[in-house]
């Protein structure tokens, strides 16, 4: 694996470490502001990945799947980051602190709407990641060095279409299971 691949791994681990630290400090040590500080560090992790990717490409690296994956990671992190933190926060509060209400599993039309909301966030992640990929292609300005980036964008668009088709199907055919 190359530097960008290892940076993606480190950033993903770092993302979850700062979230867990933030939640531990917030709820176990009752330090609300310090816990919020750690939760607010997640965009810094994204910035580190962006810098490493940009420097690697600037130094003449041929764009590979890890450079494309870094753009996907950034798009997903920005689009889904707040909801992932909220999801983790709710479960931490209920399962670790034994406070609050049990997280409710969505069923029926609630599930269909939740799935569509996820697809819309996926679209936002795609737009953010696509802008980063197109910017890489534009700044490198050498199709032989950016072929993988273009291919990744096409594959991601196809996957996005499948995501929307599945979400739409919940409204039309599948009717997600009813509450017990």
Image (tube, rainbow, N blue to C red):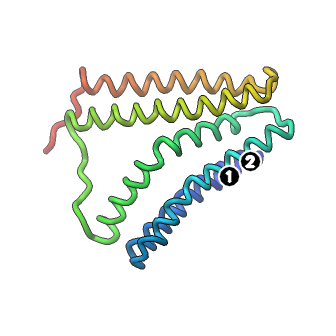
Q: Is residue 43 left or right of residue 88?
A: right
Q: Which residue is drawn at 76% across and 32% down?
A: 63
**CA separation in Å, label 2 and label 1:** 6 Å
Q: Is mark 1 on a helix, strand or loop?
A: helix
Q: Where is residue 109 in the image (x, y as percent from the top left)?
A: 21, 33
Q: How many marks?
A: 2
Q: In this view, does 25 lie to the left or right of 71?
A: left
Name the residue beneath numbered marker 2: 52
In the picture as drawn, the residue positioned furthest to the left comes out as: 180
- Location of the C terminus by quadrant is top left
Q: In this view, does 1 lie to the left or right of 23?
A: right
Residue 25 vs 10, above or below: the answer is below
Q: What element carries label 2?
A: helix
Observer-nearest of 29 and 105: 29
Observer-nearest of 17 and 39: 39
Q: Position of residue 128 (x, y in %)?
A: 56, 34
* Location of residue 69 (image quadrant): top right
User: Badge 2: few (under 14), some or many (20 or more) residues near its Cα, within 10 Å?
Assistant: some
Name the residue beneath numbered marker 1: 48
């Amino acid at each position: 694996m190359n530097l960008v691949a290892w940076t993606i791994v480190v950033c993903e681990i770092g993302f979850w470490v700062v979230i867990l630290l933030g939640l531990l400090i917030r709820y176990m040590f009752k330090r609300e502001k310090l816990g919020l500080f750690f939760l607010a560090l997640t965009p810094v992790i994204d910035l580190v990945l962006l810098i490493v990717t940009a420097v690697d490409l600037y130094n003449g690296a041929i764009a590979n799947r890890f450079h494309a994956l870094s753009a996907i990671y950034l798009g997903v992190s920005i689009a889904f980051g707040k909801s992932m933190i909220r999801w983790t926060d709710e479960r931490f509060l209920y399962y670790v602190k034994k406070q609050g209400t049990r997280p409710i599993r969505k069923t029926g039309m609630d599930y269909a709407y939740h799935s569509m909301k996820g697809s819309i966030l996926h679209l936002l992640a795609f737009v953010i990641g696509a802008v980063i990929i197109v910017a890489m292609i534009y700044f490198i300005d050498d199709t032989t060095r950016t072929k993988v980036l273009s291919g990744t964008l096409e594959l991601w668009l196809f996957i996005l279409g499948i995501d929307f088709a599945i979400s739409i199907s919940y409204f039309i055919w599948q009717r997600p299971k009813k509450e017990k």
